[in-house]
Image (cartoon, rainbow, N blue to C red):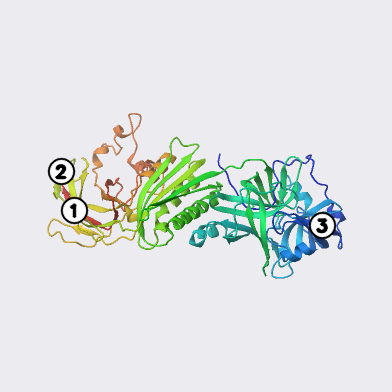
Amino acid sequence: MVRKCCVLAGIFLCLYSAMAIRAAEVYPLEAVYPGLRGIGKTVVQGTLIEEFDVEVISIIPQPASIPDLIMVRVSGDTIDRSGGIASGMSGSPVYVDGKLLGAISYAYEYSDHRVGLLTPAVPMLELMEIIPTLDIELPNGFREIATPLAVSGIGGRALAPLTKAFAPYNVQVIPDVSGIIQQMDSARLEPGSAFAVQLLRGDFQVAAFGTITEVDENGRFVGFGHSFLHKGNVNYFAAPAVIHYTMPNLEVPYKIASAGSSVGAIYQDRAAGVAGLLDAKASYIPINISVTDLEHQRQDTYRVESIADRSLLTALVISSAYQGIDSSLDRIGPGTAYIRLEFHAHNLPQPIIRENMFYSDSDIAVWSLSDLSEGLEVLMGNNLQPIDLKEVSVSIDVENSRRTAEIEKAIPRKFQVEAGGSVEVEVRIRPFHNVVETRVLRIDIPEDTLPGLMTVSVRGGSSGYYYAKPTVHTTWESLQEQDVDVMWREPTQAESLDLLLNGYMNRERNNEIVAEFYPYIDLSSEFNGDGYYDSTEFGDEETVPISEVVMLEKDFGIPQWESNNNEPVRVRLTTQYVIEGSASFDIEVL
């Protein structure tokens, strides 16, 4: 099963019952007074846990359901080197007489970085049963220490989807300052240790960093002292971390860190902190990205593992794919792309596969990933059935050449046809900077089509993606072109998951020529003289009053096109070009 992965903060796991034995003795909040001194633990550089001095300034009263917060002043050589309380220190434990008082969780921005707030130990250790429901009331200027969200391997415009996805959360997105350390001298997590909460791991990484507050004898751990994304039940990777440097900053200093290999999982993200379990395995979705630069005959493969959070998965996958394309092509510009997407799920009998072809005269990466974004939304965001996604594969071949062709004219080989007959249509397309080519489609006219003129439109399957040029309309009399507005849209709703997935996989492709018309059907033969729908349509059990047919149409999934309720007839022909433009002509049904 696939779940989620998140970012940093302390961690503590499993259902922590009221009778569970705590790993540390707690210093009682009622015994706290101004001037009380203690010792804090954190990592400023490397993996060495260092101590710093803590002095209580005051108690900040909170609503009845939330324990009071403790205002403190920190000092010592460790704090001098860090520049004060830094992002990434969330969860740093503070002890008085060897008893756990609480964890660093809030800082004062743009002012004295040596003054902060502690979250008391009790609500953190009882994270699973005591969850505050009221907003914490802080003095003016205080805020939760922003979680440093370090991004490794993803930068530039590929970072934009991540920045947008994390905008609502209290995180600092810091690109290109993190790394991945496969082997560390010590992967043991203990109070004061730096650790990472990974959302994405592999060739690209998105991870947040904080400090462990406490670890019990069963491997459960807690940290942070406040929520990360406040998502409640979660499923993230947890890993030890190395602090390279603590960067001074006017707002709040922050730690530059790298993550090691995962050593556990995080299962709770609540107001008092985050909690998890060592040696547990977090669920994830493997993402495989293959990019081939056809111009230089170079192929690169990128592999990452992502959380399955609905609100974050698309951004993590799209940012990874963008970065893969940009890294392989080492340019941003025009090109033609051939893309194949595969989505595998535990609860689907077969993979969802989508192939398409794209061209852009400015940024081929942006256009080529539109189907990927839509596919993730269809699978993860549909309201029909939850999808337990197992794996995503993205294969993209890119060339510099422009592989497009514009429809210049569509001419039927005959302009009159009987209902039930067929018409062959010659479609003249002009490849970019090349001679005209002809493709032939055959359209079949339904037998129950009413006599009269009928307009047939011929367009590229890319009309949903690209700017549509005026339609070229061909008539029997003159074969002169004229502008005609053609309305076309794909159905946006499906009655079942099968229809939704089939619609995504089989939707028109940008390299197809599509001939389309709406036949005017004679419905009178389907009604009996009493104003009832003919029973052969529904079986012999019952007849349906005409007054109910309109209500039934929505259930039957009949799309609407202006005032015509008939299903359109479409014929599709695959080409080696991205098809642009459109044409139309009239034929007479006899």
Question: Secondary structure beneath disc 2?
Answer: loop
Instruction: Using the rendered image of the protein, determine whether residue 167 is visible from the camera's viewpoint.
Output: yes
Pointer 1 with pointer 2, Cβ within 8 A: no
Instruction: Using the rendered image of the protein, determine whether residue 115 is visible from the camera's viewpoint.
Output: no
Q: The disc labelled 1 sits on which kind of residue?
A: Asp
Task: Give neighbour class at mark 2: few <14, some 14-19, many 20+ (Cα, 10 Å).
Answer: some
Q: The disc labelled 2 sits on which kind of residue?
A: Glu
Task: Please identify, in this view, whether the residue under mark 1 or under mark 3 is nearer the observer.
Answer: 3
Question: Secondary structure beneath disc 1?
Answer: strand
Question: Secondary structure beneath disc 3?
Answer: strand
- Number of residue marks: 3
In the image shown, does 451 or 363 lie closer to the viewer? 363
Task: Give neighbour class at mark 1: few <14, some 14-19, many 20+ (Cα, 10 Å).
Answer: many
**Going from the N terminus, do you reach mark 1 or mark 3 first?**
3
In the image shown, does 344 or 43 lie closer to the viewer? 43
**Going from the N terminus, do you reach mark 2 or mark 3 first?**
3
Figure check: 113 above or below 4 = below
Disc ID at residue 39: 3
Which residue lies at the image location 57% right of the left edge and 49% below the top edge?
201
Disc ID at residue 586: 1
The location of residue 164, given as percent across then percent down, is 53, 59
Image position of 213 (left or right of 344): right
Task: Please identify, in this view, whether the residue under mark 2 or under mark 3 is nearer the observer.
Answer: 3
The location of residue 151, given as percent across then percent down, is 57, 57
Image position of 368 (left or right of 98): left
In the image shown, does 191 or 531 lie closer to the viewer? 191
Marks 2 and 3, Cα distance to the nearest angstrom? Answer: 93 Å
What residue is shown with label 2?
418
Disc ID at residue 465: none
